[in-house]
Image (cartoon, rainbow, N blue to C red):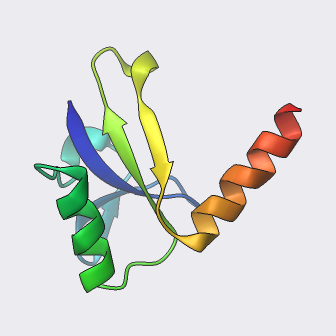
Amino acid sequence: MKILVQNCLNHLYLKSLTVWTADPSEAKSFPTSEKAIAYCAEHRIPAVQIVLKFEPNRFNVTVPITTECEQAAGSQKALLN
């Protein structure tokens, strides 16, 4: 499993502090979700969510960690109901 940071608005993955990528295999992987959250908080990275990326991809888990992502997730849930 890889622990990644993803922008919830454009779905790009964090590669480095100022670089984002569409390819999850190029993204910065964190040892724990706590470290990923701390990194985002320390660097004040907006509109992000944590992605627990498994193989195969169908079991991925996405967890919003900023207000923007919580609102976006709420909008998606409303569409599904």
45 sits to left or right of 76: left
Residue 66 drawn at (x, y percent)? 51, 69
Count of all numbered marks drawn on residues in the image: 0
- Residue at the image position 51 percent from the left and 52 percent from the top: 11
Quarter holding residue 51:
top left
- Residue at the image position 60 percent from the left and 72 percent from the top: 67
Q: Quadrant of the C terminus?
A: top right
27 sits to left or right of 58: left
Residue 41 drawn at (x, y percent)? 32, 79
Q: Quadrant of the N terminus?
A: top left
Residue 18 drawn at (x, y percent)? 28, 78
- Residue at the image position 43 percent from the left and 55 percent from the top: 12
Which residue is outermost to the front? 34
Q: Nearer the viewer, residue 29 or 64?
A: 64
58 sits to left or right of 32: right
Quarter holding residue 77:
top right
Residue 32 drawn at (x, y percent)? 16, 50
- Residue at the image position 24 percent from the left and 72 percent from the top: 38
Q: Height in image: 71 above or below 77?
A: below
Which residue is outermost to the left? 31
Q: Height in image: 54 above or below 24?
A: above
